[in-house]
Image (tube, coloured by chain):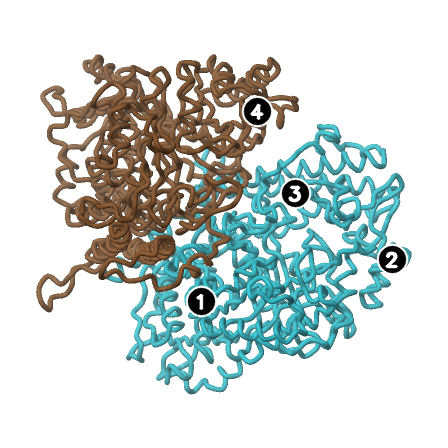
Chain colours: A cyan, B brown
Amino acid sequence: MSSVVIALLLFMGNAHAEDGYALWMRYVPVEPALAATYRAQLSDIVAPDATPTQRAARAELERGLAGLLGTAPPMHAEATQQYAVVLGTPASSPLLAPLHSEIASLGPEGYLLKRVQRDGRSVLVVAGQRDIGVLYGVFHLLRLLQTGASLDALDVHESPRVHLRVLDHWDNLDGHVERGYAGRSLWDWQSLPEWKDPRYTDYARANASLGINGTVLNNVNASAWSLAPAYLDKAAALAEVFRPYGIRLYLSARFSAPIELGGLKTADPLDPGVQRWWRDKVNEIYARIPDFGGFLVKANSEGQPGPQDYGRSHADGANLLADALAPHGGVVMWRAFVYAHDVPADRATQAFTEFAGLDGAFRPNVIVQVKNGPIDFQPREPFHGLFGAMPRTPLMMEFQLTKEYLGFNTHLVYLGPLFEEVLRSDTHARGKGSTVAKLVDGSLEGHTLTGMAGVANIGNDRTWTGSHFDQANWYAFGRLAWNPHQSARDIAADWAAMTFSPDPTVVQPIVAMMMASREAAVNYMTPLGLHHLMARGHHYGPGPWVDGGPRPDWTSVYYHRADRNGIGFDRNASGSNAVAQYAPELAAQYGDLTKVPEPLLLWFHHVPWNHRMASGRTLWDELVTRYSLGVKQVQEMQRQWSTLTDPPEVERGSAPLPSPIDPQRSAQITAFLRIQRREAQWWRDASIAYFQSINDLPLPAGEAPPPHPLAYYKSLQFPSAPGDGR
Amino acid sequence: MSSVVIALLLFMGNAHAEDGYALWMRYVPVEPALAATYRAQLSDIVAPDATPTQRAARAELERGLAGLLGTAPPMHAEATQQYAVVLGTPASSPLLAPLHSEIASLGPEGYLLKRVQRDGRSVLVVAGQRDIGVLYGVFHLLRLLQTGASLDALDVHESPRVHLRVLDHWDNLDGHVERGYAGRSLWDWQSLPEWKDPRYTDYARANASLGINGTVLNNVNASAWSLAPAYLDKAAALAEVFRPYGIRLYLSARFSAPIELGGLKTADPLDPGVQRWWRDKVNEIYARIPDFGGFLVKANSEGQPGPQDYGRSHADGANLLADALAPHGGVVMWRAFVYAHDVPADRATQAFTEFAGLDGAFRPNVIVQVKNGPIDFQPREPFHGLFGAMPRTPLMMEFQLTKEYLGFNTHLVYLGPLFEEVLRSDTHARGKGSTVAKLVDGSLEGHTLTGMAGVANIGNDRTWTGSHFDQANWYAFGRLAWNPHQSARDIAADWAAMTFSPDPTVVQPIVAMMMASREAAVNYMTPLGLHHLMARGHHYGPGPWVDGGPRPDWTSVYYHRADRNGIGFDRNASGSNAVAQYAPELAAQYGDLTKVPEPLLLWFHHVPWNHRMASGRTLWDELVTRYSLGVKQVQEMQRQWSTLTDPPEVERGSAPLPSPIDPQRSAQITAFLRIQRREAQWWRDASIAYFQSINDLPLPAGEAPPPHPLAYYKSLQFPSAPGDGR
């Protein structure tokens, strides 16, 4: 087949199937004039093809250019007369030798995108110290083309600020994805290792395009079976697919595996038999997967086994595994999301209480993985107090991409602003400017082991993430893991351009929708610092009335503490004193009713209903106003979307412009916004009905009363809501 | 966009993505000379577009011809000068008035594909009495083109022989598919009713292409929630998608729903409150879905509630629902797959025992749905004794397309020969020639309510069925439901031509593989009438040693009864006397060790290991030989497949021909055959190791001993095997 026909096929294939499968790697034709410029600048390419990663880089560039420019330029393994682009490493390409030290300064994963003069011509260099950097550079170059950027004076030096950039899959071996809203697990364990679905390769491509370099295949609520030989064979087959794309494979380890799998009587980390079992198991893994990344562990949390079962500490547990992994270069990602069997006075304080004192007790190849906030991936939380409180311990950020508490896959909620808000939070750990981002990238405390994890929102749905807009959350996570100092808005703009169209009249309204969406969700779900008021178990829809059950901290009333007089969780010295887990400057701010930011008001304070807010309204009136505002914000998103899908007439009587959005994605997004609108209203109405039943206060003027009595909202049941734990 | 571009896009889209999604409706270009002939014969088309079904027929023809011929001919709603094809009903097209009575004779779903003379020209007529017949006719015409048939002297008169042609989905509301090996449920309940995934339409197209006219959305192990208003709204949205394609929607009804959903104290079918509840519920359904088909019920079976809980009969239960449905034209499909809490002497006899005596006790809108064999979808069973034993009751065939007992989705096992074997079985109910097919199509007893159900093998996997070859089982079921007298081989040939290529050098080896595949599975799993020896619960892999547990008839030893002296289940008068549930001629044959067909030998007889077989070998030697033969048959399938994917050199030193199979499907099929080969060997080795541990006999000469001791095979565990019930 000629390369023109291949190009046409790729183009046609992409043009035909706007079903979301291509993600942000659609590579559809750029505007003709620009394409001509790009074609001239990318006319002849020198790219080595000796290693799998080199072939991946070359193939991606070929695929991208064929789609974007209509035809892929000639590719050569060796220098030619007229080359305009050169890919490679100083080792793989003699043409890059002069840039040797400049490239070396970028580190093992960095890359250079630079226009240089060679033999009197301008040549574009895409170079890294290793092959993987070159692949990253290719994706960067393709992004520039996809967003219509100029290639005239390129001088890009990029290195990741964070070492471990990892997706955590909460996938069970039976294919169920805990808190998954995008179908089943991508991993078809039954047909592995023989069948390597091409989708595994596309998964690796998508991650590599963002610089994600690790994946934890299985749920933190882990089955010991994941470590059984048959599953290791299957995992090794996946590792083989991922390796050329720079992605290392990790597994969640069940702490009691020595008992369940090894037949030992104990999993005590200080027991020599247990230590031997883990050493042997780790050796067994590395024999199959020489670049295995290590273990992620959830221990002594929500019923999982752990070192405390034997009177040992989290450090003892983590170090057990770390010692087994160390000879191979593997790491332990030990989760700090823990809470004891005994319900504490304030669950928000527990991880801090258990971990802060262990600072310095962990092996060098342990990184403690901390959720962004002290409760559990709520629409809004203050940053987790452990950030800044364990200077001698590398801390890894854990974000949740799958929207367990944010409307599942059907609500449009762009998480970029949430991630950004957390990363830019100032811990004051080393004075002003000690942002969470500087703790995550290691710069504040000089750690070299650094990491950011995203709980994946990926399944076997054709869109990967269960909706078109949820792809943006995967995308934003990857970009921020590479560099946590980036802007969520800029990332949204890149994503929108690549996913829909670089036309500013498309990008602008989409970015506006995205940037407003998270605050909308906060408003219609849990405004003003409220949290964890979702329905029990599956977390689908409102449940502010949830009480009873096995533990108080699994109820809503535990968190909102509303009574006839007021609402909110007192986390001051007069209450749980959670504020003391922050730096003194912050504790003073959070603890002062007059200084606490209103978005965190009810997180830190129990406040009378008639408390006067900045708006001049009472707290109750403000709360109701916020709920209604959330609904209006969704309506505004619908309006913005409709301007794209049903463009207005340009002048009176003229034919409307064609929609810049393809009909298939347009239809799904429109339908999902309708679901979000309906459910936002449900959140507002149910929440108001409930809180009004507590405080008996009238609604502010102009606010419609809930259309149903509270009993109706409480009666709704959803026994088959997706993603529930099993 | 011009229609040429559209055609190109469709073609390119298809050519690009051979991922199985297009099923047998790929519509790839036919060979150029043939395309020219077809184009001339199909140059101008008159097709009405006033109703949704008319538009579906027209759109399918447009899509098909654009793909097959490179361009879709002009379509007109009214007659033109030069038309060459006319679609429609006598009501929708005046051109068809002369054929009025010929068309009427074909019934409401029939169609005519006929070349007639009009104004001195030859015109191709695609006509039915109703729109749906026209759609069926369009699919028939497209099949002729896809298989390269001549359109010169067409004179096709088709009417379905069976009234209800239904897929039974065993899909739970949480997306899990019981015994599903193709991903999650297609039905995304969470985003319904707002979002109607285009895949629902493609599902409807695929079914309509076969004449399937009903679908039961939810598992027979039903949740009462399926009947709750919110789910009925969602079901109604699906019904709306399916309606233009002639597909009626059915629901599995949980017998105790009046208690669980209605808050009643009883579900007793004779209770007036219960009767009222079902009447109201049925009215509520028809208000949303005016063409609702009715209920499928599994009652008093495997723990499901039913009328026997109140001392009532299956007829009482079925009639309760039938009376509620009758005013709307709905039916009850009442399953005969029952077995009591008390383990009977022979489970194979139980459905007969419970149902035969109820003949004549059911309402006219009840059809009793009987599995093809008396146990449970085994690789081979004799036909179910109820066929022929209930002359006054319509009996519906239930086949299982999902391969619960036949290697899941990774084994290539074409079920056409199994279906054909059952349908051609002679019940002798009204003398010789009283085939099961004649009972199913109603002709033997003059029933007009007739049906065939297939337990669907469909999920959200991109291939729909979890593998490319499993699509053939959906296909064959649909074709046989339309006409149960067709040949499984002919159907396989059509499917292979449409799915891969009409080239005889492709069709021939693929059909050979398919036709041999079922016997291969019988051989490597359960030869000579053995049955139900799969592992416990998930049924993945061999488990002839399974014993103990809650009930003897959930073990393997119950079924094979092997001891030191012999093997097999004595179902003669000396044993369970199951033979008495067949007509006397058959009972005499099955019951006689010298006359019973060897493939059913151990189903009906307990036979000494040294029994002399037709081959001259002892039973034990024959058994071992059969197991090994099964493995060899899979190896032969691998060899046949490799001739397609790696064609031999035509002459010494010449370049090999390009493979006629696209690389993506080729790779998956090759990998799956490798899995099948490995698992066939596992079945052989484990079975031989086990039975040898019982009889202590030597292997026949040349037979390799199992590579592991029996303890190894028994130790294998698969806690996450797919499809297990939950």
Residue position for label 2: A572
Q: What element carries label 2?
A: loop
Q: Nearer the N terminus, badge 3 or badge 1?
A: 1
Q: Which x, y percent locates residue B357?
A: 41, 18
Q: How far apart are marks 4 and 1 (CA)?
A: 52 Å
Left or right of A537, for residue B588:
left
Front one among B115 and B575:
B575
Mark 1 Cα-neighbour bin, 10 Å: few <14, some 14–19, many ≥20: many
Q: Any mark on residue B523, and which?
A: none
Residue A558 appears in the rendering: yes
Residue B675 appears in the rendering: no
Mark 3 Cα-neighbour bin, 10 Å: few <14, some 14–19, many ≥20: many
Mark 2 Cα-neighbour bin, 10 Å: few <14, some 14–19, many ≥20: many
Front one among B528 and A53:
B528
Q: Any mark on residue A236, and which?
A: 1
Q: What residue type is labelled 4?
A: Asp
Q: Which amino acid does label 3 sit on?
A: Gln
The quadrant of the rendering that contains the N terminus of chain A is bottom left
- Which one is in front in this view, the residue at disc 3 or the one at disc 1? 1
Residue position for label 4: B309
Q: Which x, y percent locates residue B533?
A: 39, 46
Q: Which x, y percent locates residue B25?
A: 29, 40
Q: Mark 1 lies on which chain?
A: A
Q: How far apart are marks 2 and 4 (CA)?
A: 59 Å
Q: What residue type is labelled 2?
A: Asn
Q: Which amino acid does label 1 sit on?
A: Ala
Q: Distance between the residues labelled 3 and 1?
A: 47 Å
